[in-house]
């Protein structure tokens, strides 16, 4: 026997172990009980023999009990085995121990048997009625009759009311009652005294006679609906004060008080096969062994999973016993009749690692080696193309094109947009594979509230060098503007290799840009606006009619430098081009609406000059960053999040109140004595209306929160763009800002935009934008919680802009040499934007470039520029 694994295959422990075979009347196999007795040692020096007693019929339930000697007999106390047969007999045998030449031997003798008139299902035993010195036996038949035996004599039989199919049966000695689970999926308890004084089942012939016969009606003591069929039931009592009823269901196991109230329940992940509650080391808790059909044995302490172990079979019964000096042995019985004894844990390893000779560490050599390794890592990161991997080549190509014209018949299915007609545009996605591929998936993503007619496609098979085209339409679904007009088409497929025949997942994607006229229409320019932005360029202004040919509906020469746009959601934007300077102005009534037009303007300007072969075209921003307007949108979004929390909290309180009123009403309705409702029905109706109103408010707040989050993303894109134009940031630095300010695609109550951006901006301030090494040593908290207000976030964003203005540069490298804190005179201070019409005097150029000693305390004046005249 190997002590680190299963103790043995078939054993009989020193403490008596009883098994109940499955309650399945359809089984006709014979379960023989094989016992082995004797000292079990590693060398198996002492062997033992056993006598197998096979009953004439298949036993349905076998239990072992220690029986004292009866009066008038000289036999010593022996062990009794009760066996209830399925078909016709209940047999009681005793076992006596004897010493023979080849070891110890048990001999089983028949004491008495009862021929049953009904097919037996299961049995239980106990001191029914409080008798002392002997056990009575109760057998449940297949037709719902409880037959009670007092040793050699038959006592009485009772039919269970409302019986359809038998369930597990057990006896509670503390309450002197029988507990079973009916076919109605109710746990029912019957007092023994009620059974004894009820009408005898043998005298009942029909229902009319039952009504007129003598005796009391069999009434259940208590019942509990568990909603599922029970596999087993067990009574656990570790103290005189209380006991627990454990019921193993098909999906849960329950712990009940002896009065039928639920102590706790646990939902099981796997289908259980057997269980065993037993005492726990911790006071006040109970351990439970639960076997399942996945060949697993789980150990729970109350409802907490403490251990899980693998078994070589599906256990149908489990017990805990002792084998000589080995305590806590887990005995399991398989569905094929194998009995296995195991124990948890393993023998300690006697191996000890030898002590290593201590030596002094040469820190100088470690420093040199560390620098060499860091240099190798930097070289590899700087030249990613040096490693030519043929596996990195994509075997699938994907292209996307957007039709230049809108659909003649709109494919929009939205009714939320207030416009009369919602246009749609067709997008064509072409997929071409170099090799044969199976189950290729194509997903399309557009920024909400944009939507597509179909966003998921599956190709069962792609032939080599064959191109497949997919068409779908995109339209505006919500009554607010998206934060981006870009979409993404992602194709996922699997490539099988020698090491991985199932395939390695790969992803190929492409981006496409939707036209502005999908969400925008030409409109009359507006002279007045609350929010204005001015974009500077280094080239002469271009006619807006040339830049936006699809939106030019004016023919007058005086209006070629002014264009008006109206989004289909209702807001309006005006673009003006200066006649005397190289500037463009974008103005609107709402700050976030400036983003899409400003982005479209810069893209069309770059595209125009690239077509003419001009490579040095640049845009810049010389005004102050509109942080106050940005902070207003942050406050609006944060206020909606707080409102959402309050509404959810109120909804939870009203739901709890609603359930409490329901319980009160159900109690009143179940009461046999009618009692006044005391306006509980009115209170229930009022609470129900409050729950519905709060649910509607929560749904409306969620919609407003999504709309506010999209507006906030648009404003964030605009602020990042202005920061890049203001400080002439590179593409990598703009990508860092976008990663810090736009970390979430969707907003939620658990993880919101405010706390995430605050942590990201604080990280930038303490790393690449830090003033001293002390700031770099500070650690950020690892837990993100919703803040009390937005003051800290606003402070960090303002500080980030201030350090960028003083020459700070964004980078992700941890190398100290990569940190460049320099002052660039071209854009080191916030320059207040002024209307060109209000600039009447030029500023002194001598105040533009102060000395470095005054940078920290002096605000720089903006560079003088010629007056820009915008034709309105």
Image: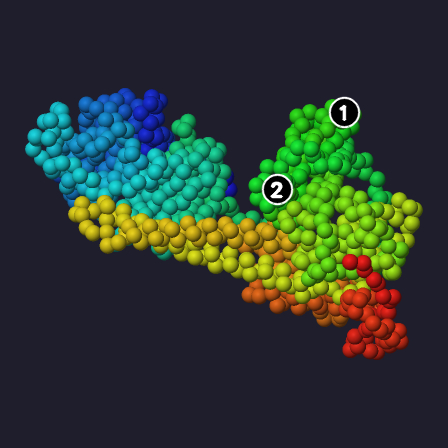
Instruction: Residue at 14%, 29% (x, y): give it.
Output: 201
For the C terminus, which image quadrant? bottom right
Instruction: Residue at 74%, 40% (x, y): give it.
Output: 512
Q: Is residue 599 visible?
A: no
Q: Residue furthest right?
A: 613
- Residue 156 location in percent, x, y? 14, 32
Instruction: Residue at 11%, 26% (x, y): give it.
Output: 208
Q: Is residue 515 visible?
A: yes
Instruction: Say which of marks 1 and 2 sits in front.
Output: 2
- Residue 278 location in percent, x, y? 36, 46
Question: Would you name the residue on which mark 1 appears?
Answer: 466
- Residue 142 location in percent, x, y? 25, 26
- Which residue occupies the foreground of this view, 67 or 749? 749
- Residue 806 location in percent, x, y? 79, 69
Question: Would you name the residue on which mark 2 appears?
Answer: 420
**Disc 2 packing (10 Å; few <14; some 14–19; many ≥20):** few
């Amino acid at each position: 026997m190997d002590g680190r694994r299963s103790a043995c295959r078939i054993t009989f422990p020193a403490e008596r172990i009883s098994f109940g075979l499955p309650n399945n009347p359809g089984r006709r196999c014979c379960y023989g009980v094989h016992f082995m007795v004797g000292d079990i040692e590693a060398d198996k020096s002492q062997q033992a023999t056993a006598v197998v007693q096979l009953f004439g019929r298949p036993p349905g339930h076998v239990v072992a009990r220690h029986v004292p000697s009866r009066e008038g007999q000289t036999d010593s106390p022996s062990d009794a085995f009760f066996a209830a047969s399925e078909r016709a007999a209940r047999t009681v045998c005793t076992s006596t121990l004897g010493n023979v030449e080849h070891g110890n031997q048990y001999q089983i003798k028949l004491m008495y048997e009862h021929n049953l008139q009904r097919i037996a299902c299961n049995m239980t035993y106990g001191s029914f009625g409080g008798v002392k010195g002997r056990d009575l036996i109760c057998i449940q038949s297949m037709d719902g009759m409880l037959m009670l035996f007092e040793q050699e004599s038959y006592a009485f039989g009772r039919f269970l009311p409302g019986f359809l199919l038998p369930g597990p049966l057990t006896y509670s000695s503390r309450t002197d009652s029988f507990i079973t689970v009916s076919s109605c999926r109710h746990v029912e308890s019957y007092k023994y005294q009620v059974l004894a004084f009820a009408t005898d089942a043998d005298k009942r012939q029909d229902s009319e006679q039952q009504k007129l016969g003598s005796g009391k009606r069999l009434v259940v003591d208590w019942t509990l609906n568990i909603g599922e069929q029970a596999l087993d039931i067990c009574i656990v009592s570790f103290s005189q004060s209380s006991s627990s009823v454990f019921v193993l269901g098909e999906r849960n196991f329950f712990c009940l008080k002896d009065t039928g109230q639920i102590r706790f329940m646990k939902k099981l992940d796997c289908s259980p096969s057997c269980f065993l509650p037993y005492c726990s080391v911790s006071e006040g808790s109970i351990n439970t062994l639960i076997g399942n059909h996945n060949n697993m044995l789980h150990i729970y302490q109350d409802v907490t999973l403490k251990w899980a172990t693998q078994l070589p079979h599906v256990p149908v019964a489990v017990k805990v016993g002792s084998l000589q000096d080995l305590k806590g042995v887990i005995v399991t019985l398989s569905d094929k009749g194998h009995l296995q004894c195991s124990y948890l844990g393993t023998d300690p390893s006697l191996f000890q690692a030898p002590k290593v000779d201590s030596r002094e560490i040469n820190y100088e050599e470690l420093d040199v080696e560390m620098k060499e390794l860091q240099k190798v890592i930097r070289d590899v990161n700087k030249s990613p193309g040096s490693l030519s991997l043929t596996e990195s080549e994509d075997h699938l190509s994907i292209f996307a094109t957007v039709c230049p014209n809108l659909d003649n018949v709109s494919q929009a299915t939205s009714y939320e947009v207030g416009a009369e007609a919602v246009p749609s545009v067709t997008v064509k996605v072409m997929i071409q594979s170099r090799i044969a591929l199976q189950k290729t998936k194509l997903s399309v993503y557009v920024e909400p509230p944009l939507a597509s007619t179909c966003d998921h496609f599956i190709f069962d098979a792609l032939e080599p060098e064959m191109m497949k085209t997919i068409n779908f339409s995109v339209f505006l679904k919500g009554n607010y503007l998206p934060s981006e007009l870009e979409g993404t088409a992602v194709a996922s497929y699997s490539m099988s290799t020698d090491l991985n025949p199932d395939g390695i997942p790969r992803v190929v994607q492409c981006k496409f840009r939707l036209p502005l006229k999908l969400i925008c229409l030409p409109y009359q320019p507006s002279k007045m606006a609350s929010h204005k932005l001015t974009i500077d360029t280094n080239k002469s202004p271009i006619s807006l009619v040339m830049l936006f040919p699809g939106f030019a509906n004016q023919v007058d020469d005086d209006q070629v430098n002014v264009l008006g746009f109206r989004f289909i959601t209702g807001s309006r934007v005006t673009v003006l081009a200066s006649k005397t300077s190289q500037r463009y102005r974008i103005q609107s009534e709402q700050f976030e609406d400036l983003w899409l037009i400003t982005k479209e303007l810069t893209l069309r300007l770059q595209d125009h000059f690239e077509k003419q072969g001009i490579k040095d075209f640049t845009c810049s921003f010389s005004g102050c960053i509109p942080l106050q307007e940005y902070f207003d949108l942050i406050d609006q979004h944060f206020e909606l999040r707080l409102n959402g929390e309050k509404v959810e909290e109120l909804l939870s309180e009203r739901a709890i109140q609603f359930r409490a009123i329901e319980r009160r009403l159900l109690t009143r309705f179940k009461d046999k004595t009618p009692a006044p409702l005391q306006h509980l029905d009115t209170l229930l109706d009022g609470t129900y209306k409050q729950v519905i109103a709060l649910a509607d408010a929560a749904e409306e707040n969620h919609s407003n929160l999504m709309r506010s989050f999209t507006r906030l993303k648009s404003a964030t894109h605009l602020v990042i763009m202005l920061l890049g134009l203001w400080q002439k940031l590179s593409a990598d630095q703009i990508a860092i800002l976008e990663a810090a300010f736009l970390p979430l695609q969707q907003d939620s109550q658990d993880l919101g935009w405010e706390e995430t951006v605050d942590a990201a901006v604080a990280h930038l301030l303490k790393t690449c934008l830090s003033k001293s090494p002390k700031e770099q040593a500070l650690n950020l908290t690892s837990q993100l919680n919703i803040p009390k207000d937005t003051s800290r976030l606003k402070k960090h964003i303002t500080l980030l802009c201030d350090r960028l203005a003083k020459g700070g540069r964004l980078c992700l490298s941890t190398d100290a040499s990569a940190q460049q804190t320099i002052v660039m005179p071209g854009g080191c201070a916030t320059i207040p934007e002024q209307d060109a019409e209000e600039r009447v005097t030029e500023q002194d150029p001598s105040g533009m470039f102060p000395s470095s000693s005054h940078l920290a305390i002096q605000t720089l004046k903006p560079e003088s520029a010629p007056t820009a005249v915008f034709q309105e």
